[in-house]
Image (cartoon, helix red, strand yellow):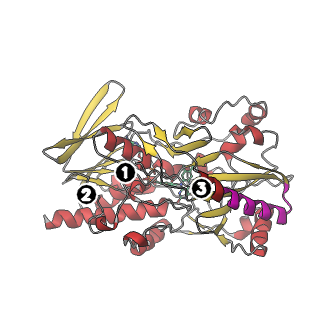
Amino acid sequence: MRAIVVGSGAGGATAARELTLRGYEVLILEAGKQFQPFIRHLSWTEPLRRFGLLGSEKTITRFFPPMNIIRSEKDMVLVRGLTTGGSTVLSCGSMVRAERGLKEIGLDLKFEFEELEKLIGVQPFPKERWRPLTRRMFDAAEDLDLNPNPTPKAVEELKCISCGLCELGCVNEARWDSCRFLDEAIIRGATLKTSSPVEKVIIENGKVTGVVVRSGRTKNTFKGDMVVLAAGGIGTAQILKASGLPAKDNLWVDIVLTLGGISKGAHQLKEPPMVWYTQHEDYILSPYLDILSHWFHKPWRNVPIEDRVGIMVKLADLEEGSVYANGKVEKSITPHDHIRLKEAISQAKLVMKFASVSGPYIEGLHNGGHLGGTVPLRSSDISSMKPPWLPEGLWVADLSLVPRSQGLPTILLTAAIALRVVKKIDEYLKCK
Ligand SMILES: Cc1cc2nc3c(=O)[nH]c(=O)nc-3n(C[C@H](O)[C@H](O)[C@H](O)COP(=O)(O)OP(=O)(O)OC[C@H]3O[C@@H](n4cnc5c(N)ncnc54)[C@H](O)[C@@H]3O)c2cc1C
């Protein structure tokens, strides 16, 4: 049985690994190139930044091609990884069980979470290695009864050099990413083809029998007994729509907004991002120096990196975005999102004030990198893990399946979903 897996991020690499473990022949088609972390000499960016010569946030893709940026409205930027490992290679390594809205549809992923946490090795980053100001902000959050907790992390303490730049790829391989699962799948016989963007699936007599890959003027077709789409909330929806299948206009992104303050010589970048977090109904607060805002957000320009301090708000946004067959994305910040962000930002400001971080407190760029919801599961889909409008032979195994935004890190959730989907594929094929 030959499975074609599209994408190699949290969903795709997990699915590919699990399929090879269960004896399937696997071909992985990845749009991006082999991932290379950014080789860090950041000092040259500082003078350019101060004079506003770095241009817009799109510049980042020029000096770091794996990071893909889309402006989905005037005030919102979407970030994803287009490379082997997908967005996991850009991640902060935070590993939290996100389950918002799952109980409502009858989906319990406890066993998958446990299995993945053991495989990946999840634990908090030791407090002794937090920056003094980060500890002070943790204490402030405690004093304010915000109940902060150390964040479960997939970062190996002994290998981590505390460069703070997890999101540009980990040069020391201290932070887990899904390339590890990808490598395991390849060792077990999977074939990986990079620079292979899937355009659409091939449907013959109501059954999916393969995919079309189009790169520039070159077109190739690949045939398989099944296709597992794991191109992420945007990529999967784009392929489905280009294939005439009705991906839903329910894109969510978990909006991130970082409040910036100032503390001389804080050096917040000298630790992994997000070492603790406070959890609220639909958002979290977490210490985070937002490098996108530092480089590209004009109001942040006049503060040097060593003095900049940030607390991130990550909000579960309303699920109302759209992806089109040509890759265009529409996703705006709704009035409801603005109200929730305002409340969260006022709490972040209090934490900063209590920890003696000075103002002016300035908000950063709105951005989102948790892209899901475009193939939402309903209660009636849980027994098959497949919405009924997907034709025979076609499966989805990424964050697209999750109907609700999370306001929490989403790698564990995506990988858990992919594990469950492969179990269902196996059950389905064995009963056939
Ligand atoms: C900057 C950043 C930091 C993050 N930090 C964290 C964190 O600390 N913890 C956490 O839990 N989550 C984090 N996330 C979110 C997390 O990485 C994603 O939610 C998760 O990776 C989603 O998995 P996925 O498989 O749906 O998509 P992805 O991991 O994005 O994988 C999609 C894959 O499909 C490929 N692809 C796209 N289109 C095509 C196509 N047409 N043909 C072939 N291949 C295609 C892409 O190249 C990619 O490999 C972060 C995200 C970003 C952007």
Judged by depth in the image, the label closer to the viewer, 2 or 3, is 3
Q: CA distance from mark 3 to mark 1?
A: 30 Å
- Which residue occupies 82% across, 49% down? 307
Does the closest atom of ligand 1 sit within 8 Å of the Cβ of label 1? Answer: yes
**Residue lying farthest front?**
335
Q: Nearer the viewer, residue 430 or 324?
A: 324
Q: Which residues are magenta?
A: 341-358
Q: Nearer the viewer, residue 267 or 429?
A: 429
**Residue 142 percent coordinates (x, y):** 75, 74
Which quadrant is the N terminus positioned in?
A: bottom left
**Residue 285 percent coordinates (x, y):** 67, 62
Element type at mark 3 = helix
Q: Which residue is mark 1?
A: 230
- Which residue occupies 74% across, 31% down? 52
Image side of residue 273 versus residue 15, left or right: right
Crowd band around label 1 with a 10 angstrom C-alpha radius: few (<14), some (14–19), many (20+): many
Q: Is residue 273 visible?
A: no
Query: Magenta segment: does it hold 349?
Result: yes
Q: CA distance from mark 2 to mark 1?
A: 18 Å
Instruction: Check disc 2 and give the amino acid type.
Output: Pro
Q: Which residue is mark 3?
A: 336
Judged by depth in the image, the label closer to the viewer, 3 or 1, is 3
Instruction: Check disc 3 and give the amino acid type.
Output: His
Q: Is residue 148 visible?
A: yes
Instruction: Check disc 1 and give the amino acid type.
Output: Ala
- The total number of labels drawn is 3
Element type at mark 1 = loop
Q: Which residue is mark 2?
A: 388
Q: CA distance from mark 2 to mark 3?
A: 31 Å
